[in-house]
Every structure is written in C-alpha cells, then in structure tokens.
Image (cartoon, helix red, strand yellow):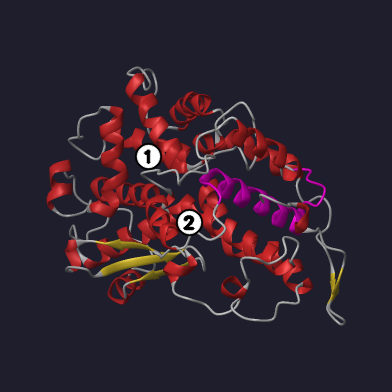
Amino acid sequence: MGAFPDDDERFRSPPLDASANAVGPDRRLGQFDRHSLVLWLNPLLSAALDSQGGALPSYSVEPPDSVPQRAFSAHLHETIHYWQTIGSTAGFLHTLGDATSAFSVMDDLIASKHHRKPVLHTVPDDADAADPALLASVRWRHIEYGSALLDDPMRAVALLQRNPRYFVSTGQTQLSLCANTAASLADAFDRDFSGLINPESWADAYERFVGDQHKGFETEGILRIPLGLRDIAEAQARISEIQHRDLTQQAVSWRDVRANGWLGPVYARAFDRFLELAKLDEPETPREDSVNLFLLVCDVALNPSTGYADDLDQSRQFVLDFHPGARFERLCHVVARSPDLLKGHELPSRDGYEAVSRRLCGVLGGRPQRKWLSLFSNAGTRPPRETNLQNSTPAEPMAPSTFTGVF
C-alpha cells in the first residue's frame, strides 16, 4: 500500500513483552511478535537456558529466581503467547490481519490506474465509488481497524480519533475482519467452504444489525470496550508463569506476587477487572480456584465460534458474542451470578474445564472450542490453487470483490 509509516499510523500492534523487576527496571526478559511469529529472549536468559540443554531437570537444584529459573519462566511466558496467537480464534484472526488485507485488496490494486503512493493517503475523497483504488483503500482500512479494535480497543479508539477516514462502526470492522479472513483462508485450502463458513450472505445480517441498532453497529461513535486480546493474553501468560514458579520453584503468596512486582499494570489489568466484576476477593495463593477460573475465562473469551466456525445469528448481539474483551466482561458477570459454578468441578482438570466451559459458552451463544474444531476436519479436501511458476499465471482466483459495500 505504499510507504510504511510508523506503527501508530498503521494501527499495527506492538509486540507482547515479558518484563519483571527481578532483572532491573524496564529491562525486557522476552518478547513475542505476533506479526512475524518471532520469539525473542534476553541474551543473558537465552544463554542460561541453552546451558541447561533447553530445559530444566525434573527436580531442579537451581535456587529460586536464579537466572536459569527466570529464563525458563520467561520462555514459558512467550511460548504461551505463541499458542495464544496460533491456537485461539482471536489470536489467529489478529495475526492474519496483514495477510488478509493483502489478499483482499490485490485484485483491486492490479485493476487500479492509480499509481501514486502511498495509496491510502493519495486516493481523493471524491473518487468514484467504483474506483478500484478507493475500494482497496476502504477494505484495507476496515480490516486494519478491525484487527486493532480486536487487540487493544482503547488504544485503537485514540488512534481512530486522529485518523477516522473510512471508519463506519466497531461492529462493521469486526465483520469485515471475519469475512475477509474467511475468504482468504478459503482461497488457500477450502474453496468449496466445506469446513469454513461462507460469509457471502453477511450483508443481509449487517443490515439487520444496523437497523436494529445492535451494540457496536451504531454510527454515532466508537464502542468503547475496556479490554482486548492484548490485555487478556498478557494476564493469562503472566499468571500461568506465576503458577509455574509457585509450583516448581518456591511456594509464594499473592502478597509476594504483588510485592515482587510480578503483576505490573499491563499484566494485572484483566485479572483485577475479573475480580471486580466477578465480585471475588483477591486470592491468597496462585493455586486458588479463583485463579484457575480466571485462566479458563481467558480461554473462553479468546475463542468465539461465531463469525469463524459458526455463521451469524441475526437475533444475537454479534460484537458482544465475538469480541474477546466484550466476552470477557460478560463472562465475569456470569461468574458473579453463579456462586455454584465450580461446584462438583475441579480446576485445573479436563473434565472440570469442559463442564465449566460448556456453561460459560452457553451464555455467550457459542460452543467450546473443542466442540467446533471438528468442523474443520473436512476442510481442504480440494487441492489448493496451483500456480505455473514458469509463466506466473495462477488459476482463476476466488474474487475478494465478492464482498462489496460494507466489507
């Protein structure tokens, strides 16, 4: 799309960090970039982990908070970010954002006679509605906005207030992200939509959402959602890391967790919100049921089935069922209303996980992830599109221009 401006202007999400006071103020232990899928560890910690052969012995003799122990904890934290990215609905849709945008605008860019760069900043506002350059710019922005609002809605709101061009509504951007991701995936391995949902009829659903003034589809402003994918992912990774330290290195109290600075603001935001909305007291240790329930709520929040594995239900609130931050808020309220939620169920355990997940997903109008993964078992039965590398003439592609207007 032309020149590459800074991350803020591109609405590009910064990497996920792991840091702690134990190695000095503002010193990063590790980092995971969800756009390139690159995991990075502080060189000191990386060397310490390599010295152990890449893993700690079953009964480590390393003292608590030693460099090898911190290295393993940081590596665990970043590895969790990797699995959150490729293994959750929200993470997968977000990390595919750039590829989805490129696929979705390619045909329009090829057809366009607009040769000025960057395209996003040089297409005039009064361009013809059918101008391929305008169509490409609008679709690119819609997907970009959708990805940014999915990941960090409060940051995205601030950016949108400075750069609102082509923005329609929060709900429209989320639908655009889902529809165009489905189109790009289908073109790669499921052109018959044998496993993926087919979004070609979503324009009707969109009109219904707008007409009925569903949450997030109002055009008067931007829906403000307190948390997003980033907040939930950071809290889940850090608290999992804390549990690992507690179970394998040295038993700690929650007071120790706070005092040691292990739960700084970026990591505590979602957990503190959980305790507030669920009306739960702060735990005494990282092993309490409330901590394990929080980790499960994070899992459910990050894995909507609607718009990805399930078609749209026009009678339901799409944004509240799909956006991870909105799902998280609703799940916390379910916990507050359900003091018996864990009755007869042990967490962490597979049976407890499935039973509680079913109950939580029932409220959100979706299914537990394990129940819908089987939908993709038939996907890809048709060979992917072939390309003749000698003359670079691809087989006829699936046309992303099928998704006109709002998408």
Mark drawn on residue 168 = none
Q: Is residue 72 left or right of residue 123?
A: left
Q: CA distance from mark 2 to mark 1?
A: 23 Å
| x 54%, y 31%: residue | 317
Q: Is residue 192 inside the magenta stretch?
A: yes
Label 2 vs label 1, nearer the camera: 2
Q: Which mark is residue 148?
A: 2
Can residue 88 be seen from the camera position used here?
A: no
Q: Position of residue 262 (x, y in %)?
A: 21, 53
Q: Is residue 63 left or right of residue 187?
A: left
Q: Residue at x 35, y 17 (%)?
A: 340
**Quadrant housing residue 71:** bottom left
Question: Is there any visible trace of residue 184 in the rendered image?
Answer: yes
Q: Position of residue 378 (x, y in %)?
A: 76, 43
Instruction: Give the magenta range.
Output: 168-195
Q: Is residue 361 above or below residue 254?
A: above
- Which residue is more in the foreground, 30 or 90? 90
Q: Is residue 364 above or below residue 222?
A: above
Q: Amino acid at mark 2?
A: Ala
Position above or below: 71 against 251: below
Residue position for label 1: 295
Please tell me whether residue 315 belongs to the stretch shown in magenta.
no
Closer to us: 356 or 167: 167
Locate residue 266, reporting x and y percent.
28, 54
- Few, some or many residues within 10 Å of mark 2 (<14, 14–19, 20+): many
